[in-house]
Image (tube, rainbow, N blue to C red):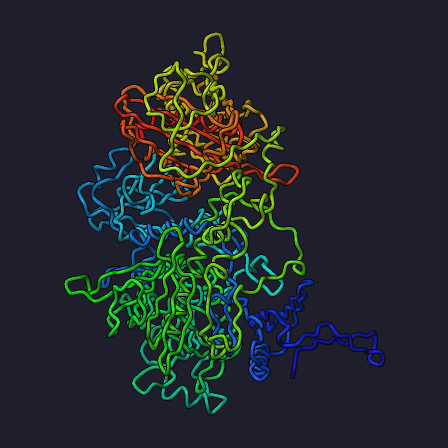
């Protein structure tokens, strides 16, 4: 009655059996109860100041045990008692409706869960997408479900293309300029058709032509156009897509491209959300590798159990064999079944022929299918419907038909009675709570409604539950494209912009946040948006009861700095549903943000056992009498910063601490992402703040005290020998480090790593020597390297006189880079013996790079070979390694040296920082060698432009802007940027992060720039300074 005791009986024989106590705890000493109803298990966790212990047990019926414990908790309740937190593993729920936050979500990536990006970054991402590509779909517009049905019925989806803005080789842009072009995507590849035609004007097969796909959407503000970038051996294509359709095009391309890649053993697209497999899932013992996906039923069976379409051969089905499924109209063994079936009987109509155009993709899009009972019809009887679980490019949908003859396999009409969007599922009850439900019935609970379905027997029900829960797990990061509309009365409104006397205020809950709207004549659908709150703006929410009426209390941040909160109260009888919708979408948003971390460098897994590192209980635990009528009901209070965004320790927790104005220590200068670290002097997961200097074998330079905040950067006068064209805006730095080399420079003449040893092998073939690159090709290579530093992809070598062309793409993720070189044979004869050898680099151990062989080494005309190198930045570098390439063509030897298109600035990650914080940190990095400064003239034929600088940094995405472009009295425009250089894990286990600040001053009248770079150490400052100097020289070209 007072607690839980677990004992086990042990002994070698029955007469010697003894009982041993394994666990004992009072109800209110248990900190957490975690339930996994899929395996009928429960985890009891007991926490105290001395540590945490837990025990996992499997029982005969965990659902009954949960119900019993909840009743006992209610009976034992006393004022001030701290109830254990309830958590759920997987999708199954017990007798009480769990909250979305109580569920441990699956993991589709190899990144450990528990860390999210900074709040400010997440807020910026959400705002950009809400106003752009993820704007809620308009009423009547084509949306997710329509595109999913296209996939189901046709095996592909078609998205309209914009008539202008297309790019591609061979006059492709002119071909589609007339309008009416469509992009079709299916399991085989991409095709562009005109005017609804069947014959494509462009066909790009995944297995032959598509090397990479990239989607431009609303967040790529520095890029021209919204659409799809496709890299192929024929060249690069850009397919412009309307903003309203880009989300569906992205989903389709991600799904089909990922299915192709995963089938071939390749990883999924980085940061993609569609078409992925579950890699890890939570168990009561922690996160474990996901089990193999369950196999569904691909046989099509009529109501009498006759197989009308067998499963594929490898599934064991075959035409002409005996039916493997019993008739659902067999004599019911129970009177209850007879009454539930009513007068339902088999149709006497003959089965129609299967549609050939659907048969070829049916087994790809269908995951599971069969008959289930559902209440329907005028009399609300339990009737059998034919259910099909589809895996589409827009997510999983459980669709049902009145009869198997109505499904797309037999009928061209869209006869779907309804669709259950599985990305909207919050949980599943394996035992229905409906009193009149048939045996073997279960509930699917979505944010919109509950569905109760009944299977033929327990085996059938278990298979349906397995297939549905796996589908929900795979859709963990897929979000709806519509909104849920709640009409409310604004009882408390600090902004005084909403009506307080009626229910004319609408809260629209969507995937990026909550829109607060008031009635206004002339506005779209009669509503005007007063506020939009991203989910990062939510601080606390709870349902409250005022008399007999329910309301939702919201605490939200009203500023981008998260320093001002307002409290709103909205009355609505649907307050619990409104709170659940908000929690559901926050959980989805967190999952997407977790997926976005794939762009970051992977971090080492923590070395800790499950017993030493139990899953943490929520930061806010409800107590009886603290405003909650029932701790087990749905009206608990939630603190966003303390309990949600602090999803483990990391940048999100640091941002939350920054919101509460935590002080900064001087050691935090090493890693800007550590703002608000709870442990002074220890940042980035426990790394000592002087580790970068230790690794470089030097002593830390003394930091100057931070000056008082200034209204604008105020530099000291320049040296007397130099005419100051910039109005002395920045403090004069120490003499710059020798600017002799950088990632592609050898000297001030900017030969981009093509020094004398390279020129020696670039001969003309005389005397049997290999043929090399011409001076014109070297100049083009020099310019291509500049573009590579900014765009990270594009042609690297494209000399028509040379038989080999090279394209490059570099993907940076924190301290790591993947370098993809595509060697294309543009000659008339085959290339043989194609090899590549890495050498050089300064310092030579700065980049840790693998050296695979080029495969294939023999390349036919118009064909290509791909060379993928994995590289990790271990310390700042000034010269990247070179790749010595050699081959034979037409009996002639060829050789050249290509500088690897990898740059130290690529390993810099942007850091959001306010201008006062920037100024403070700038003043603290004025030691010897920490600052580099130079006047940079733009390349010939271009002019100095402040907008070009902003565009340059926006395209490179390595530094965040910390200020607006403002001019001083002399017309000089100063722009501030901040980033952090990431380096790899050394043998001692340390990973280094070094903050770097950049100020670019533009004097458009004089036609010059002044570049100022400061970091914690001169090697970081010098390396980044040299890379940026070249990029700024050519900024106007970008």
- So how many labels did they put on this image? 0
| Residue sitting farthest toward the front | 708
| Residue sitting farthest toward the bottom | 335
The location of residue 70, given as percent across then percent down, is: 56, 80
**Camera-nearest residue between 473 and 393:** 473
**Camera-nearest residue between 162 and 206:** 162
The location of residue 545, given as percent across then percent down, is: 39, 78
The location of residue 1017, given as percent across then percent down, is: 53, 30
Say if 1019 sits above or below 106 in the image: above
Answer with left or right where residue 374 lies relative to residue 27.
left
| Residue sitting farthest toward the left | 522
- Quarter holding the C terminus is top left
| Residue sitting farthest toward the right | 16
The quarter of the picture where residue 693 lies is top right
Answer with left or right where residue 990 lies relative to residue 495.
right
The quarter of the picture where residue 785 lies is top left
Q: Can residue 866 be seen from the camera position used here?
A: no
**Camera-nearest residue between 187 and 763:** 763
Residue in the image at 40% along x and 36% along y:
977
Q: Can residue 1 be seen from the camera position used here?
A: yes
The quarter of the picture where residue 824 lies is top left
Say if 509 sits above or below 449 in the image: above
The location of residue 781, given as percent across then percent down, is: 39, 22
Residue in the image at 26% along x and 69% along y:
505
- Quarter holding the N terminus is bottom right
Residue in the image at 45% along x and 25% along y:
733
**Camera-nearest residue between 920 and 407:** 920
Say if 550 sits above or below 719 in the image: below
């Amino acid at each position: 009655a007072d607690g839980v005791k677990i004992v086990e009986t042990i002994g070698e024989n029955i007469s010697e059996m003894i009982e041993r106590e394994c666990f004992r705890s009072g109800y209110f000493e248990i900190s957490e109860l975690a339930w996994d109803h899929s395996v009928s298990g429960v985890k009891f966790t007991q926490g105290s100041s001395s540590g945490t212990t837990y025990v996992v047990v499997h029982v005969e019926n965990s659902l009954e045990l949960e119900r019993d414990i909840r009743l006992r908790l209610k009976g034992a309740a006393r004022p001030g008692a701290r109830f254990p937190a309830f958590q759920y593993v997987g999708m199954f729920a017990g007798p009480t409706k769990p909250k979305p936050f109580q569920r441990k979500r699956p993991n589709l990536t190899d990144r450990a869960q528990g860390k999210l990006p900074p709040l400010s970054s997440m807020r910026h991402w959400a705002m950009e997408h809400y106003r752009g590509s993820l704007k809620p779909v308009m009423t009547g517009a084509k949306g997710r479900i329509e595109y999913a049905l296209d996939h189901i019925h046709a095996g592909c989806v078609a998205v309209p293309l914009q008539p202008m803005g297309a790019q591609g080789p061979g006059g492709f842009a002119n071909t589609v300029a007339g309008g009416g072009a469509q992009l079709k995507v299916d399991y085989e590849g991409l095709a562009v058709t005109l005017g609804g035609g069947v014959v494509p004007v462009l066909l790009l097969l995944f297995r032959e032509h598509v090397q990479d796909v990239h989607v431009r959407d609303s967040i790529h503000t520095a890029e021209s156009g919204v659409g799809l970038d496709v890299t192929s051996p024929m060249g690069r294509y850009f397919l412009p897509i309307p903003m309203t359709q880009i989300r569906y095009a992205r989903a389709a391309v991600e799904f089909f491209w990922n299915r192709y890649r995963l089938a071939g053993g390749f990883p999924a697209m980085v940061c993609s959300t569609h078409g992925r497999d579950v890699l890890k899932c939570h168990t009561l013992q922690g996160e474990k590798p996901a089990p193999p996906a369950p196999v569904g039923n691909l046989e099509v069976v009529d109501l009498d159990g006759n197989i009308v379409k067998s499963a594929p051969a490898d599934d064991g089905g075959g035409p002409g064999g005996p039916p493997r499924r019993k008739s659902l109209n067999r004599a019911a063994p129970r009177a209850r079944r007879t009454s539930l079936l009513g007068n339902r009987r088999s149709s006497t109509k003959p089965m129609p022929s299967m549609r050939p155009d659907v048969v070829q993709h049916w087994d790809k899009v269908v995951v599971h299918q069969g008959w289930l009972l559902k209440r329907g019809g005028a009399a609300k009887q339990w009737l059998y419907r034919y259910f099909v679980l589809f895996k589409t490019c827009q997510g999983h949908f459980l669709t049902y038909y009145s009869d198997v003859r109505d499904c797309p396999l037999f009928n061209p009409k869209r006869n779907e009675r309804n669709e259950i969007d599985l990305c909207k599922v919050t949980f599943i009850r394996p035992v229905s709570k409906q009193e009149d439900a048939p045996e073997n019935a279960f509930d699917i609970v979505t944010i919109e409604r509950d569905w109760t379905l009944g299977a033929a027997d327990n085996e059938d029900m278990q298979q349906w539950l397995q297939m549905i829960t796996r589908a929900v797990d795979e859709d963990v990061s897929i979000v709806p494209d519509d909104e849920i509309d709640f009409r409310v009365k604004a009882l408390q409104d600090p902004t005084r912009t909403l009506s307080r006397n009626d229910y004319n205020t609408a809260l629209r809950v969507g995937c990026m946040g909550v829109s607060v709207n008031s009635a206004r004549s002339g506005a779209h659908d009669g509503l005007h948006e007063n506020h939009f709150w991203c989910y990062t703006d939510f601080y606390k929410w709870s349902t409250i009861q005022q008399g007999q009426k329910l309301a939702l209390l919201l605490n939200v941040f009203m500023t981008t700095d998260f320093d001002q909160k307002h409290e709103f109260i909205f009355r609505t009888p649907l307050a619990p549903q409104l709170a659940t919708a908000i929690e559901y979408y926050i959980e989805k948003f967190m999952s997407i943000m977790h997926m976005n971390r794939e762009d970051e460098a992977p971090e080492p897994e923590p070395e800790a056992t499950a017993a030493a590192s139990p899953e943490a209980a929520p930061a806010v635990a409800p107590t009886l009498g603290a405003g909650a009528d029932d701790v087990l009901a749905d009206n608990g209070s939630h603190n966003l910063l303390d309990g949600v965004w602090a999803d483990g320790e990391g940048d999100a927790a640091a941002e939350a601490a920054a919101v509460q104005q935590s002080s900064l220590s001087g050691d935090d200068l090493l890693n800007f992402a550590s703002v608000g670290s709870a442990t002074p002097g220890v940042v980035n997961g426990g790394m000592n703040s002087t580790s970068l200097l230790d690794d470089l074998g030097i002593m830390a330079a003394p930091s100057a005290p931070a000056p008082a905040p200034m209204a604008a950067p105020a530099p000291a006068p320049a040296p007397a020998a130099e005419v100051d064209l910039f109005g002395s805006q920045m403090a004069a730095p120490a003499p710059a480090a020798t600017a002799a080399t950088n990632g592609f420079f050898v000297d001030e003449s900017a030969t981009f790593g093509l020094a004398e040893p390279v020129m020696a092998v670039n001969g003309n073939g005389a005397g049997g020597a290999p043929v090399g690159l011409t001076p014109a090709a070297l100049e083009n290579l020099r310019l291509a390297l500049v573009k590579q530093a900014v765009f990270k992809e594009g042609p690297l070598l494209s000399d028509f006189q040379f038989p080999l062309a090279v394209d490059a793409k570099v993907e940076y993720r924190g301290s790591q880079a993947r370098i993809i070189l595509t060697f294309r044979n543009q000659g008339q004869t085959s290339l043989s013996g194609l090899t590549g050898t890495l050498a050089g680099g300064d310092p030579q151990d700065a980049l840790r790079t693998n050296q695979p062989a080029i495969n294939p080494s023999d390349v036919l005309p118009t064909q290509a070979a791909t060379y993928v190198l994995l590289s990790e930045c271990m310390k700042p570098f000034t010269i990247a390694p070179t790749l010595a390439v050699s081959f034979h063509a037409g009996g002639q030897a060829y050789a050249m040296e290509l500088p690897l298109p990898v740059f130290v600035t690529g390993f810099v990650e942007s850091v959001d920082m306010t201008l006062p914080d920037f100024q403070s940190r700038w003043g603290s990095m004025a030691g010897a060698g920490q600052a580099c400064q130079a006047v940079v003239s733009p390349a010939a034929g271009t002019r100095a432009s402040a907008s070009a600088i902003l565009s340059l940094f926006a395209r490179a995405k390595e530094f965040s802007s910390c200020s607006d472009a403002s001019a001083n009295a002399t017309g000089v425009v100063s722009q501030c940027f901040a980033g952090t250089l990431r380096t790899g894990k050394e043998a001692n286990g340390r990973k280094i992060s070094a903050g770097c600040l950049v100020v670019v001053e533009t004097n458009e009248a004089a036609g010059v720039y002044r570049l100022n770079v400061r970091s914690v150490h001169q090697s970081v400052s010098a390396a980044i300074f040299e890379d940026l100097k070249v990029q700024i020289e050519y900024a106007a070209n970008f």
